[in-house]
Image (cartoon, rainbow, N blue to C red):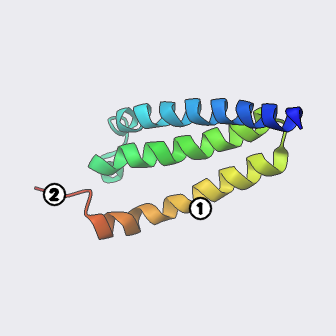
Amino acid sequence: MEYIVFDFIIFGIVDNAVMILGAFTGYEVEKFLPERFKLGALMPIVGAGIGNATSDFLGGLASLNMPLAIGSGLGCLIALALIPLFDKKFNVNRKK
């Protein structure tokens, strides 16, 4: 039982650390992209999503749980497809 709790603690530390790094760097990456790929206000959201997918995968690897790593990483990447739908609904990327 204590090993399972320890695995989740490792997963949580790695997961959040990498996800936070992704959120901080999401906007910074945009300046290196060609104009057609610049997403403005959506870039931090994309950065957080990619950071979360990476962090979930690395958290699963760090806790030595390959099904968790692959499943959560892929699930997060698939969910990134929802960003354009949410943008259309909430109009985050407003052009003024």
The residue positioned 25% from the left and 56% from the top of the image is 93
> Left or right: where does residue 24 sit relative to residue 53?
left
| Helix, strand or loop under label 1 | helix
Residues at discs 1 and 2 in contact (Cβ within 8 Å)? no
Residue indicated by mark 2: 95
Answer few, some or many: residues within 10 Å of disc 2's Cα (few below 14, many 20 plus, some between 14 and 19): few
Task: From the top left corner, tell me how far across and down residue 48 is, in percent.
Answer: 47, 43
Q: Amino acid at mark 2?
A: Lys
Figure quadrant of residue 84: bottom left
Figure quadrant of residue 77: bottom right
* Residue nearest the observer in this picture, 4 or 90: 4
* Outermost front residue: 1
* Outermost left residue: 96
| Helix, strand or loop under label 2 | loop
- Res 10 visible: yes
The residue positioned 54% from the left and 37% from the top of the image is 19
Q: Amino acid at mark 1?
A: Ile
Task: From the top left corner, tell me how far across and down residue 83 is, in percent.
Answer: 42, 61
> Left or right: where does residue 46 sit relative to residue 71?
left
Residue indicated by mark 1: 78
* Distance in Å between CA atoms under marks 1 and 2: 27 Å
- Res 39 visible: no
Check the picture and name the quadrant holding the N terminus.
top right
Task: From the top left corner, tell me how far across and down residue 45 is, in percent.
Answer: 40, 48
Answer few, some or many: residues within 10 Å of disc 1's Cα (few below 14, many 20 plus, some between 14 and 19): few
The residue positioned 50% from the left and 64% from the top of the image is 81
Check the picture and name the quadrant holding the C terminus.
bottom left
The residue positioned 67% from the left and 55% from the top of the image is 74
> Left or right: where does residue 94 sit relative to residue 71?
left
* Residue nearest the observer in this picture, 34 or 79: 79
Q: Give the mark, 1 or 2, whose residue is nearer the N terminus.
A: 1
